[in-house]
């Protein structure tokens, strides 16, 4: 019974950690769908959003504002920063690169990553800043069934709830609003969308803004969990296998991929780790992604790739 | 006026197939090689201005040569065969640790017998490091038969992270040193001890010259044409009778071999003592940048890109000092980040095909100069 309890604990904590990967992967998917750009800068956007939030929050609290007002103002400030970033990126980097090869666009987002990382730390400082938006202690569930119960940390649950709300919100935004419909049209076919009068640059700005806001949401959760710091940018690398497993173009895929990666790597660390040396979390997700790719080259939920000459 | 091939008639098949068909190019190349092989050592011996002290050779020329070699290797895979790879750092690491293991003796105790290879001379170690890297390259190239583009890039990331982990965790590779950092054996090339920076530089130069010429010849031959056909459209290439298995895996093997040799040189000659962190993902990105900025599908471009990416941060570091602006080291490093990113974006916007394209347009212009057409 202990073994099963332990399994359940690892599994649940893995799933919830996976939800947090999904939060980062979502930003990738949104931009990739709408513009075909593989946005490597998503991780640095999480850093920028987190730094903007935590620094303005600290400043406002130090000035004597009440906590709730500081949080609202801080979130708005961070949102404005993300909007400015989206505008600058669209206007000065991606705008001039329209119609270039996917590889060139990918490299340019790595350039953007450097700029955002440098600028964010230059403007807001480069220390580790603790963020306290959510409770960080843990619950013990099912104490009657298992000795010691199952440890579930509250921040992970909050992350799950927020991800659910976010996905529901995005689904509504994409399905029910005019901009959402335009976004889907652009995702389907750039040229056709443009020919019926959808302004591409505006749509791309909106997409980057939405991805920036998703990054802000991810930053609140990750920032509470780890503190806002430079290493948060490595999340972008963790989100890549999530994308591969789910497929680059699928929002539900990002969620399911996150869950698979989160649960898979935690279980692998707990059950395989002792046999082949610890720390396999580091690469397990990638190997998992590689196996999925060999079976389904477009990921579990990606659109089927049809090739013609 | 000067750069024009008028009057250079090709009278034999050999001349028609020459690696550098234009005489001026040949003269320039010989000039460059003579300068690199003789001029720089002479300047170093007499301590002429830019080479006074050892800084330039030790901190710029040697890393430039080695990273150019790595960029040539990656360019074969990404530029010529069109297979995006983010795992160059891992292949460099395999080259480095492979060479290290061969240099200190390999001992694998098996059930029946023990594989026991005595320490080999450094030259063979470096090449064997490349061979090891080539084997792993073939292994991680297999997914490329099924997936392509950015999906493949993520698959090569699997190699990067897996080998980062292997060289940290598997103590066998580091000969069970407690710190995980290892020291290269003596650089004894058939009795020639490379100890001074200029000697190390010459060793690197020999390797780089040989492999760059080899690569240049490969890409204009049969196999290079196969790679380019695969890059341009793999299905069409397959239909005209190119075997994707053979073309893609040979690109992976040769590319990984060159990158592995570069990794072994980087570890043995430039670093001397190193730990796995020297070959992490940042190294992969650095080499990919060199290839893209220099120009995909150009051997010359690999060198230009390597020079740019390597020298840029060093120059940017000097700017505040030169202007006399007092700023902290940390601020400078952050600003270097921003400026590097901005320059990369700007270069991609003005010339997405890299320095190599600028060079070829320049050559076209030079051919007509001073007449407009």
Image (cartoon, coloured by chain):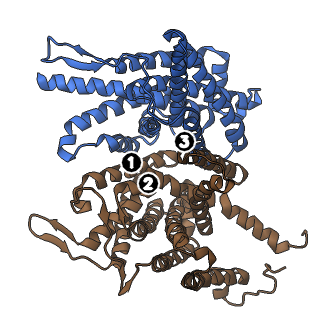
Chain colours: A blue, B brown
The residue beneath circle 2 is B87
Q: Are marks 1 and 2 on the same chain?
A: yes
Instruction: Say left or right for B38 vs A9.
Output: right
**Residue B71 x %, y %:** 53, 63
Q: Are marks 2 and 3 on the same chain?
A: no
Q: Give me the C-alpha separation between circle 2 and circle 3.
A: 27 Å
Residue B84 seen by the camera? no
Q: Give me the C-alpha separation between circle 1 and circle 2.
A: 8 Å
Secondary element at image label 1? helix
Residue B196 seen by the camera? yes
Image mark for residue B158: 1
Q: Residue at x 31, y 30 (%)?
A: A263
Secondary element at image label 3? loop
Q: Which of the two labelled residues, at mark 1 and mark 2, occupies the earlier sequence position?
A: 2
Image mark for residue A86: none
**Residue A68 x %, y %:** 51, 9
Q: Quadrant of the C terminus of chain B?
A: bottom right
Chain letter belonging to callout 2: B
The residue beneath circle 3 is A306
Chain letter belonging to callout 3: A
């Amino acid at each position: 019974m202990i073994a099963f309890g332990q399994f359940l604990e690892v599994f649940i904590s893995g799933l919830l950690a996976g939800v947090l990967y999904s939060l980062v992967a979502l930003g990738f998917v949104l931009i990739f769908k709408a513009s075909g750009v593989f946005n490597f800068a998503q991780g640095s956007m999480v850093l920028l959003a987190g730094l903007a939030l935590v620094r303005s929050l600290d400043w406002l609290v130090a000035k004597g504002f009440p906590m709730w007002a500081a949080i609202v103002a801080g979130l708005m400030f961070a949102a404005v920063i993300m909007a400015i970033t989206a505008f600058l990126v669209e206007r000065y980097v991606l705008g001039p690169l329209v119609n270039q090869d996917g590889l060139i666009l990918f490299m340019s987002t790595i350039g953007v990553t450097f700029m955002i990382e440098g600028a964010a730390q230059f403007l807001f400082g480069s220390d580790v800043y603790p963020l306290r938006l959510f409770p960080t202690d843990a619950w013990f569930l099912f104490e009657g069934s298992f000795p010691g119960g199952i440890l579930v940390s509250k921040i992970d649950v909050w992350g799950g709830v927020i991800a659910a709300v976010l996905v529901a919100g995005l689904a509504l935004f994409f399905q029910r609003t005019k901009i959402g419909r335009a976004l889907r049209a652009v995702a389907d076919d750039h040229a056709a969308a443009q020919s019926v009068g959808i302004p591409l640059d505006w749509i791309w700005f909106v997409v980057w803004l939405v991805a920036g806001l998703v990054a802000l949401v991810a930053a609140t959760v990750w920032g509470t969990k780890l503190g806002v710091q430079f290493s948060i940018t490595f999340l972008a690398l963790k989100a890549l296998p999530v994308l591969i497993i789910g497929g680059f173009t699928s929002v539900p895929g990002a969620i399911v991929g996150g869950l698979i990666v989160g649960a898979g790597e935690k279980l692998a660390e707990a059950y395989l780790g002792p046999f082949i040396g610890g720390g396999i979390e580091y690469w397990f997700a990638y190997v998992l992604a590689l196996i999925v790719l060999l079976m389904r080259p477009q990921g579990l939920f990606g659109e089927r790739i049809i090739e013609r000459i | 006026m000067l750069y024009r091939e008028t009057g250079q008639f090709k009278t034999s098949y050999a001349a028609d197939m020459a690696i550098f068909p234009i005489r001026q190019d040949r003269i320039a190349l010989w000039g460059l090689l003579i300068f690199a092989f003789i001029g720089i050592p002479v300047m170093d011996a007499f301590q002429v201005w830019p080479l006074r002290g050892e800084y330039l050779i030790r901190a710029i020329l040697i890393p430039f040569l080695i990273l150019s070699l790595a960029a040539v290797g990656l360019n074969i895979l990404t530029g010529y065969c069109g297979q995006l790879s983010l795992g160059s750092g891992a292949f460099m690491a395999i080259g480095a640790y492979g060479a290290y293991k061969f240099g200190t003796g390999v001992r694998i105790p098996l059930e029946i017998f023990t594989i026991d290879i005595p320490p080999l001379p450094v030259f063979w170690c470096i090449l064997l490091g490349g061979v090891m890297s080539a084997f792993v390259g073939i292994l991680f190239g297999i997914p490329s038969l099924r997936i392509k583009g950015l999906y493949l890039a993520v698959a090569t990331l699997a190699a990067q992270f897996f080998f980062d982990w292997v060289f940290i965790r598997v103590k066998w590779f580091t000969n069970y040193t407690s710190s995980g950092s290892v020291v290269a054996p003596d650089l004894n090339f058939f009795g020639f001890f490379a100890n001074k920076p200029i000697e190390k530089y010459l060793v690197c130069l020999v390797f780089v010259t040989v492999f760059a010429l080899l690569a240049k010849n490969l890409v204009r031959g049969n196999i290079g044409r196969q790679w380019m056909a695969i890059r341009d459209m793999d299905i069409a290439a397959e239909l005209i009778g190119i075997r994707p298995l053979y073309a893609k895996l040979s690109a992976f093997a040769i590319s990984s071999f060159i990158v592995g040799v570069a990794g072994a040189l980087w570890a043995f000659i430039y670093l001397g003592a190193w730990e796995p962190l020297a070959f992490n993902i940042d190294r992969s990105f650095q080499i990919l940048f060199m290839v893209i900025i220099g120009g995909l599908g150009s051997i010359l471009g690999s060198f230009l890109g390597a020079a740019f990416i390597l020298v840029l941060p060093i120059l940017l570091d000097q700017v505040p000092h030169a202007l006399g602006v007092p700023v902290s080291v940390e601020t400078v490093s952050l600003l270097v980040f921003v400026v590097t990113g901005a320059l990369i974006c700007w270069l991609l916007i003005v010339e997405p095909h890299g320095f190599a394209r600028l060079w070829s347009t320049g050559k076209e212009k030079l051919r007509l100069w001073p007449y407009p057409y």
